[in-house]
Image (tube, rainbow, N blue to C red):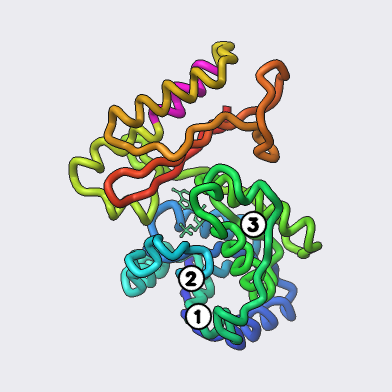
Amino acid sequence: MTRTVRVVHTVEDVRAAVAGWRGGGESIAFAPTMGNLHAGHISLATLCAQAASRVVMSIFVNPTQFGPNEDFGAYPRTLGADEQLVSAAGNVDLLFVPDAAAIYPFGLEHAVRLQLPPLSRELCGASRPGHFDGVATVVCRLLNIVLPDVLFLGQKDYQQFVLMQRMIADLHLPTELRMAPTLREPDGLAMSSRNRYLDAHERQQAPALHRAPARVREQLRSGARDFGRLTAEAKAELERAGFRPDYVEIRRQGDLAAADSAAREELIVLGAAKLGRARLIDNLLV
Ligand code: AMP
């Protein structure tokens, strides 16, 4: 079924559309984004369309999840192209494009903010203080506006997924969270809006952020258990490719707790590193 997308900007318009669908017994799946849409975002919409009868996507570059020295101002805003892509994909019913005043009616200074548990200050949270609290602050609002049955988030932002899973459970939000696999470029680089920041040479080097964790995963699969050596080698590989690594870590898959090299647990390899002016992340389930 090809869907005709309707673009709305207000909370009232979202509520009215969703209420109408609910009245007709329909179900709703939701994929929040920051825009500059790529095939990864469209794959979320495809999964939404398989999970529910109606699909809502949002585009909102959320100010509260950016630090003072981060790229909020520079973040690519390409609404015209985004609308065309969503329209051509034909798998979204409602595209919600609010401004900051719609999401934060009392202003940023006076906004109610969520504070996530300590995991939010590890991994990406260690170098991006307040980032995940900002993500929770906006995702909770969006869930309360859209009231979806199902929420899709991408595996690429794995720590975000785990923290949103915790938020939904801890706040008793009536939404089921599901994970969408990471879509990659042919050379392995995870699709990301921030790939735009790379120049031609950096773009050639960038797949190292996929290759280095992939090597760690192979070694883990062949029984290696020296986590410290494996992650140090991965960081060195990233540095050789011109990255400035933030971290490469092996963690427990379900909750991102510290992994025990003696236990047989499901693991995940996560990495974050800067290349030029881009800070990129990736991860692989072992
Ligand atoms: P963003 O616009 O970067 O905030 O991402 C919006 C949603 O799309 C998040 O749930 C991301 O995890 C997901 N996403 C981003 N990149 C990809 C990708 N390459 N493959 C699948 N999902 C993605």
Give the residue number, with chain letter if any, for mark 1: 100
Q: Is residue 215 magenta?
A: yes
- The image shows residue 42, relative to residue 237, as above or below, that is below
Q: Is residue 244 magenta?
A: no
- Front-most of residues 3 and 153: 153
Most foreground residue, 255 or 41 = 255
N-term-proximal mark, 1 vs 3 = 3
Element type where label 1 sits in the image: helix
Q: Amino acid at mark 3?
A: Ala
Q: CA distance from mark 1 to mark 3?
A: 29 Å
The residue carrying pointer 3 sits among few (fewer than 14), some (14 to 19) or many (20 or more) residues within 10 Å by Cα, namely some
Residue 115, quarter of the rendered image: bottom right
Disc 2 C-beta below 8 A from ligand 1: no
Q: Looking at the image, do the residues carrying marks 1 and 2 touch, with CB atoms under 8 Å apart?
A: yes
Dot label at residue 51: 3
Residue assigned mark 2: 63
- In magenta, the rendered stretch is 211-220
Secondary structure found at label 2:
helix
Residue in the image at 72% along x and 58% along y? 167
Q: Is residue 146 visible?
A: yes
- Label 3 CB sits under 8 Å from any ligand 1 atom: no
Helix, strand or loop at disc 3? Answer: helix
Three-letter code for the amino acid on which mark 1 is drawn: Ala
**Magenta segment main secondary structure:** helix
